[in-house]
């Protein structure tokens, strides 16, 4: 995983819930190829998947990911290739689901004053710098700590634990 990402911003409002991110009527789908077709289809940009390119960035307002605790919301955003989600604040369970699945979620107060849909932005996960490449404006979020970076760089918490178990087993056999 890169420590600095750059992409086009897609900006959403406050209280974007998991049914807007991934409507519950699709919950029976199990294959990522099917799941990702419905990313943000319940939101104010229902055709996001037609516009979104891998590496692009979701920007939310306050309480992004509220509602259901199911992982499908984070899975669908990861499935379309979201490089990061920036928001004023996150629902706690959505935030943990995103990180645990290897999808960077960054809280940045005042982000809506910095970014509009269509802007090119860059995010440095280790310094917390968020830069609007269209306007030159810069904001700072709390940098990702080493533990979260390890989860993200491993591709998620399950992959990180499997890697740690494998390393431990290798050390025990030496």
Image (cartoon, rainbow, N blue to C red):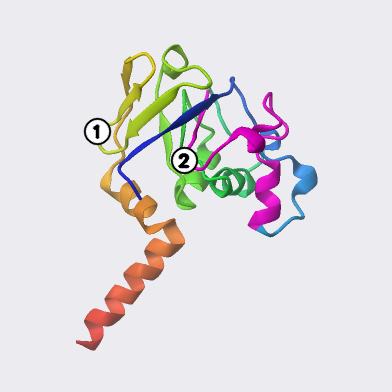
Residue 66 to residue 114: above or below:
below
Look at mark 2 in the image and give the residue it sits on. Answer: 55
Q: Is residue 42 left or right of residue 166?
A: right
Residue at the (36%, 21%) spot, across then down? 133
Residue 41 sits inside the magenta stretch: yes
Q: Is residue 50 left or right of residue 98?
A: right
Residue 66 sits inside the magenta stretch: no
* Image spot of residue 126 (x, y percent): 26, 38
Residue 129 to residue 110: above or below:
below
Q: Secondary structure at mark 2?
A: loop
Residue at the (66%, 55%) spot, across then down? 33
Assign the C terminus to one quadrant of the image. bottom left
Residue at the (42%, 63%) spot, across then down? 159
* Image spot of residue 166 (x, y percent): 34, 76
Q: Nearer the viewer, residue 79 or 62?
A: 79
Query: Looking at the image, is mark 2 or mark 1 nearer the viewer?
Result: 2
* Disc number for residue 127: 1
The region drawn magenta spans 32-60
Residue 164 to residue 94: above or below:
below
Q: Is residue 171 left or right of residue 22?
A: left
Residue at mark 2 to residue at mark 1: CA–CA distance: 19 Å
Image quadrant where residue 139 sits: top left
Residue at the (59%, 20%) spot, across then down? 13
- Asked whether residue 66 appears in the rendered view, the answer is no
The earlier-in-sequence mark between 2 and 1 is 2
């Amino acid at each position: 995983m890169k420590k600095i990402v750059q992409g086009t911003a897609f900006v959403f409002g406050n209280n974007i819930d998991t049914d807007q991110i991934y409507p519950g009527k699709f919950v029976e789908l199990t294959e990522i190829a099917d799941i990702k077709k419905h990313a943000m289809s319940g939101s104010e940009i229902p055709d996001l998947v037609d516009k979104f390119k891998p590496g692009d960035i979701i920007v939310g307002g306050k309480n992004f990911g509220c509602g259901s605790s199911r992982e499908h919301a984070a899975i669908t955003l990861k499935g379309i290739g979201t490089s990061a989600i920036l928001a004023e604040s996150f629902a706690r369970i959505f935030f943990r689901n995103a990180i645990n699945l290897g999808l960077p979620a960054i809280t940045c107060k005042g982000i809506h004053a910095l970014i509009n849909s269509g802007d090119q932005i860059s995010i440095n996960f280790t310094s917390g710098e968020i830069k609007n490449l269209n306007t030159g404006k810069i904001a700072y979020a709390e940098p990702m700590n080493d533990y979260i970076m390890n989860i993200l760089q491993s591709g998620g918490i399950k992959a990180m634990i499997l890697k740690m178990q494998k390393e431990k087993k290798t050390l025990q056999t030496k």
